């Protein structure tokens, strides 16, 4: 098992054992999700970050929409582009309801991921996707609050480093409440079904 694969299993284990917080609805009518149910979690409640267009964003900007939030970086060779492509697929699977989805990509590599680069990266998957660009100081605080792991792995040259990071996405409901954590590798159709349930219960 390589280091990247090990990290995926470790992040999943951390969630399942409760180290990232795990809350289950007790109502018999509560929806049953494929993703990990984080309803009632007391972390990852909000953010104040600048997007790739230079606009300051918070969760309130997306009221009425389901928000999918992923932490990654543009030079990631596999997990990040796969996850972004799957987000685009999920949006398509939802048909007209896809307009009620907002995908957010938070860079964990603000030193290399400049706004113009991020804008092009988002457009390659879906023009409606937004990248959020924290300062290094903001990223430290954000990662702690969102219980996200990231670590720089040095390469043969100063600019050829890679980033190990948590693989998975947070999902917020239409009221901006954290509801789900979708693990990397979950089939898009299953996540789309989870989101349909959140939309069906939206008031």
Image (tube, helix red, strand yellow):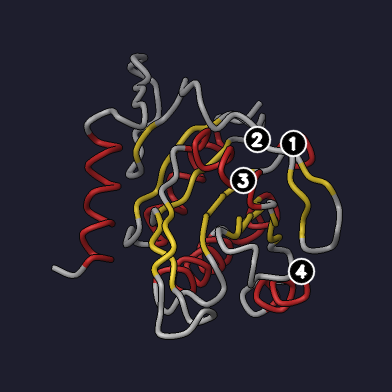
| Residue 131: % across, % down | 68, 61
What is the number of callouts on the image? 4
Tell me the residue that label 3 is attached to: 67
- Residue 188 higher or lower than 158, as above or below: above
Q: Residues within 10 Å of mark 2 (few under 14, many from 20)?
A: many
Depth check: 193 or 44 in front?
Answer: 44
Tell me the residue that label 2 is attached to: 174
User: Image point 35% across, 52% down: which residue?
Assistant: 183
- Left/right placement of residue 122 relative to residue 1 reads right
Q: Residues within 10 Å of mark 1 (few under 14, many from 20)?
A: some
Depth check: 7 or 18 in front?
Answer: 7
The answer to the question of whether label 2 and label 4 lie on touching residues, with beta carbons closer than 8 A, is: no
What is the secondary structure assignment of the residue under circle 2? loop
- Mark 1 or mark 2: whose residue is earlier in sequence: 1
- As drawn, the residue found furthest toward the bottom would be 156
Depth check: 30 or 71 in front?
Answer: 71
| Circle 4 or circle 1, nearest the eye | 4
- Mark 4 or mark 3: whose residue is earlier in sequence: 3
Q: CA distance from mark 3 to mark 1?
A: 9 Å
The answer to the question of whether label 4 and label 1 lie on touching residues, with beta carbons closer than 8 A, is: no
Q: CA distance from mark 4 to mark 1?
A: 24 Å
The answer to the question of whether label 1 and label 2 lie on touching residues, with beta carbons closer than 8 A, is: yes
Q: CA distance from mark 4 to mark 3?
A: 21 Å
User: Image point 32% across, 62% down: which residue?
Assistant: 185
User: Image point 46% across, 66% down: which residue?
Assistant: 83
Tell me the residue that label 1 is attached to: 63
What is the secondary structure assignment of the residue under circle 1? loop
- Mark 2 or mark 4: whose residue is earlier in sequence: 4
């Amino acid at each position: 098992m390589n280091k990247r694969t090990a990290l995926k299993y470790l992040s999943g284990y951390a969630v399942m054992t409760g180290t990232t917080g795990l809350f289950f609805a007790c109502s018999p009518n509560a929806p049953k999700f494929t993703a990990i149910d984080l309803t009632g979690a007391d972390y990852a409640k909000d953010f104040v970050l600048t997007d790739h267009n230079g606009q300051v964003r918070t969760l309130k900007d997306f009221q009425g929409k389901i928000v999918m939030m992923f932490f990654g970086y543009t030079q990631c060779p596999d997990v990040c582009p796969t996850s972004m492509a799957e987000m685009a697929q999920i949006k398509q699977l939802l048909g007209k309801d896809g307009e009620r989805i907002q995908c957010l990509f938070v860079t964990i590599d603000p030193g290399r991921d400049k706004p113009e680069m991020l804008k092009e990266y988002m457009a390659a998957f879906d023009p409606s996707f937004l990248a959020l660009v924290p300062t290094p100081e903001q990223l430290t605080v954000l990662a702690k609050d969102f219980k996200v792991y990231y670590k720089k792995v040095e390469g043969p040259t100063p600019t050829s480093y890679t980033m190990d990071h948590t693989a998975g996405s947070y999902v917020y409901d239409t009221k901006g409440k954290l509801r789900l954590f979708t693990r990397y590798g979950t089939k898009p159709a299953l996540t789309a079904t989870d989101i349909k349930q959140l939309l069906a219960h939206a008031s």
